[in-house]
Image: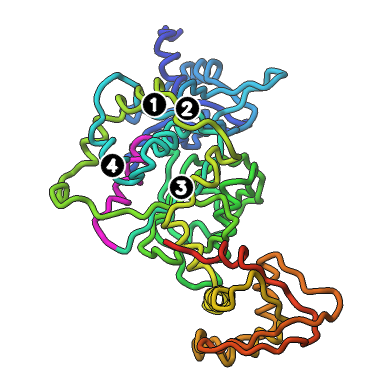
Amino acid sequence: MEIIDKQLIDEIAKQYLCIGGKWYKKSIDPITKQEELYPVNPKVMIDTDGHPYSKEIVRMVLDVAPQYLARTNIPSHVDYAECITNAIGDRFYNDYRPIMHVPEEGTWINIEQIIRHIFGEQFEMGLDYFQLLYINPLHPLPILLLVSTKTGTGKSTFCKLIQAIFGANALPLTTAIFESRFNSYWTGKLIVYVEEQESDSKEQRKQSAKIKNAVTAEKLPSEGKGKDPKLVNNYVKVIICSNDEVSPVKIEPDDTRFWVRQIPTLPQEEEGIDILSECKKEIPAFLWFLRHRQMSKERENRLWFRPEDFRTNAWWKIVNGSKSSIERSLIEMLGELMESESIRSVSFTALELVTTIKTSVSFSEKDKREVSTFEIRSILHSWELKASKKNVRHKHFIFDGEQVMVKPNDPGKAFTITKELIESKRVVY
């Protein structure tokens, strides 16, 4: 009979596991350097020299290797567990990958330099963002949108730092991959970052809706090629980097999910320095700091931070860029009208506004050709305005951008627009 060292069996068994009746071997991917699971035939196990183990060793390994009922995905870093047990004792394999860094007290001056550069005056909030990712990864966070028309801003370096910290739990995505219905590649991850957004306005709206849903939905449908879709727990956080400072995505004025930062270029003396490699050495010290740091902001919203915290100048610029040119010009025209007439409100029917737009120098020739009562009603409804239920007599202002004429008793189902509303729509940045 073959004499087998129990310690050898335990060492071999650590490499194998069974999930839902299927056997896998743990191994390190040669490209990503991350641990992956590879399907294996449980009757054929190969040692590191390529030789098959004896039947007796295989039998003993299969007896002691861990077995799980199914998979689950529970992000955790501080108290990570590969095996998750439910209330009745069933064991589940945790697909979430542990991060490879062990916290250790030290300095992190290069990481601090990157975070200060990205978050600027919101540096402490930026540290809160990292602390929540590390300590409380289950909590949803805002979509971090980093914009700059210039190159050499460090946006990509920031995303690579995120990936260096969180390993296989952070993924770069293209727009095409994010849009694909086959999304099992990224569902279940902690962080995904997208380098650029679609420039077509219709596609932008689709993408914005999908991105916003991704950061707030408790579950997402996950589908792989040739596999039925299934609902999975969703903890994903999204980072978008864009060279478009005006309209990388569509953001409505009442949206509370986008945290926009306009990123300046790196100082000239920092160009060409491989700061990322230095940052990687500092990750254990940075994690030690996060474990012992006091949060600067307590939770005040479903995405932790107050919506007011996101109202940066860069955010307002995108909100304004998300409006159609007709809406932007309409806001300015109505604001100028009320200022010139020293009035607090005006009333128009949709048709009266269309007629005014077609004669006003405040609008482009293209807008004058394309404006319709349908679009005007859509804009006014988006401002949460309703027309009067009955015809009412009202002052009808005819404003061509140079002089104002008044028709005092025109009847119609009119929308009343206040100066306060227009001021809330006029964006200053």
Which segment is the magenta one?
Answer: 150-166
Looking at the rendered structure, the kind of residue marked 3 is Val
The tag earlier along the polypeptide, 1 or 3, is: 3
Looking at the rendered structure, the kind of residue marked 2 is Ile
Instruction: Please provide percent x and percent y for residue 361.
Output: 50, 89
Q: Which residue is labeled 4 in the image?
A: 114
Considering depth in this image, is 214 or 380 the residue closer to the camera?
380
Mark 2 falls on what kind of element?
A: helix
Query: How many discs appear?
Result: 4
Which quadrant: the C terminus? bottom left
Mark 4–mark 2 distance (CA, rounded to whole Å):
20 Å
The tag earlier along the polypeptide, 1 or 2, is: 2
Task: Tell me, yes or no, whether the highlighted magenta stretch contains residue 428.
Answer: no
**Residue ranking furthest to the front:** 342
Does residue 412 appear to the left or right of 112 in the view shown? right
Instruction: Please provide percent x and percent y for residue 410.
Output: 77, 87
Q: Which residue is labeled 1 in the image?
A: 290
Q: Which residue is labeled 2 in the image?
A: 135
Mark number displayed over residue 192: 3
Looking at the rendered structure, the kind of residue marked 1 is Leu
Q: Is residue 15 above or below residue 213?
A: above
Q: Nearer the viewer, mark 1 or mark 3?
A: 1
